[in-house]
Every structure is written in C-alpha cells, then in structure tokens.
Image: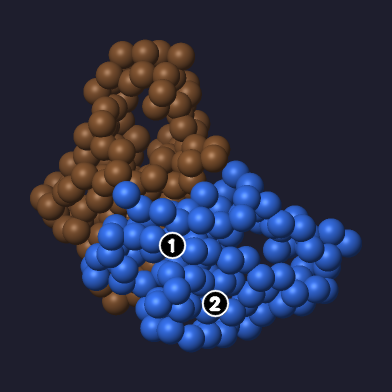
Chain colours: A blue, B brown
Amino acid sequence: GQNIDQPTEMTATEGAIVQINCTYQTSGFNGLFWYQQHAGEAPTFLSYNVLDGLEEKGRFSSFLSRSKGYSYLLLKELQMKDSASYLCAVSLNNAGNMLTFGGGTRLMVKP
Amino acid sequence: EAQVTQNPRYLITVTGKKLTVTCSQNMNHEYMSWYRQDPGLGLRQIYYSMNVEVTDKGDVPEGYKVSRKEKRNFPLILESPSPNQTSLYFCASSSTVDYGYTFGSGTRLTVV
C-alpha cells in the first residue's frame, strides 16, 4: 500500500516561519504536490516537485529528497490567512492523474 | 473563468435511492478524477479518467460508477447509496501540460 505521513496539527505565530514535513513510501513516484485547503473549501495547488532540491514561489517554498522519501513545505512571513490544512500528495504515474494524498496538516496561525 | 463545477453542493438522501453528482470543466482538460474526503483519512481517489471513454478505478471504487462520454463531463453515480458513503466529494481535472489538479467546490453528501 501507499504511505504518506504528515503531522496532524501545527501552530505558529504571525510573521514567523513554519516548516511542514511529509514523508512517503509509495509503489511509484512521479512527483510530489502540495495543496492548501481552507476549511470547507476545495484544495488549491501550491507546488510541484519532481527533482531533488528547493522550489521557491514567493512566501512558499517546497523541498524534495527522493532518496529519503521526504519533502517539506516552508511558509515564510506567516499571515493569518495562512491558517489552513496543507496536503502532501504523491503522483504514482507519469500522467499525474493518480494522486495519493496524506492526511493533511492543519496549521493554525496565531497573532 | 476557468473552473470545475460540481452539483449539488449539499445533498441529503436515503439509503438505496440512486443519485448522480455532476461534474463539468471548461478548461478542455484530458484528465478528470473523483475523490472523497473523510476526517482522519484524507482525500482518497474513487475513479479517474484519462480521456473520453477511458476510466479506471482508484483506491476506493466500491459502490460508485462513473462515465466519460464527453470531455467536459464526468458524473459520479451511486446506484444504491449506503450510510458509509456519507462524505465530502471533490471532482478535479488537469491537463497534460499544467499538472496539478483543479478541484471543484465539493459536494457534501449525507446518506441516512
């Protein structure tokens, strides 16, 4: 079976930096996605990593190490609106349409 | 506006009464997929489709059917709903170029 692990909950302070980790053991690997999901809303795409290394996109960065089965999402200059769940997902095939999701990390940003 | 549209947003039904949740996308995407989201279990894939008339099972297909007769539509059919199908359902689509799914707004289904 597929196994994708993330912490269930995290709390951070407005203006700070937070790192959300994701480890995976899957039967295939063709990239790792991060999604943001606000309560009661649909997930929205944040980032995609297929090669090792860091991808930076504004306040958000995502890192991948394929040899370690590990990724993290780094959020800088936290804002209250960043309070949401963050979903790690692995693409099992090269078409990118077999996404297996972790349980998600609920991030609470406090003033 | 590029979007994935699901209907209805909320539905309460009784056990055994057939229902269909519609999904339509206006982005000419090849790939479409259905997920269900349950507390503690995350998003689990039910069915996916790589193009018209091409569908395949995901992780939890039991009790569901899909069809892809047109590129833009991908309805989810529950022939005989049961209470364990009470969940939040998302339809999603993606292209061969962009990667990453665009999700619909979700359908909250309650089966009593």
Q: State which chain disc 1 sits on.
A: A
Q: Position of residue B104 (x, y in %)?
A: 44, 51
Please name the residue that numbered disc 1 is placed on.
A24
The residue sitting at 64% across, 75% down in the picture is: A74
Q: Are marks 1 and 2 on the same chain?
A: yes
Q: Position of residue B86 (x, y in %)?
A: 45, 26
Q: Is residue A97 visible?
A: no
Q: Is residue B42 visible?
A: yes
Circle 1 Cα neighbour tier, 10 Å, few/some/many (<14 / 14–19 / ≥20): many
- Residue A70 located left or right of residue B97: right
Look at the numbered disc 2 and give the secondary structure of its residue. Answer: strand
The residue sitting at 80% across, 73% down in the picture is: A16
Circle 2 Cα neighbour tier, 10 Å, few/some/many (<14 / 14–19 / ≥20): many
Identified by mark 2, the residue type is Ser
Q: Work out whether residue B111 or residue B104 is closer to the camera in this orientation and state it.
A: B111
Q: Position of residue B81 (x, y in %)?
A: 33, 21
Pick out the residue farthest to the left.
B53
Look at the numbered disc 1 and give the secondary structure of its residue. Answer: strand
Q: Which mark is residue A62?
A: 2
Identified by mark 1, the residue type is Tyr
Q: Position of residue B60 (x, y in %)?
A: 31, 38
Q: Please, is residue B28 above or below residue B68 in the view?
A: below
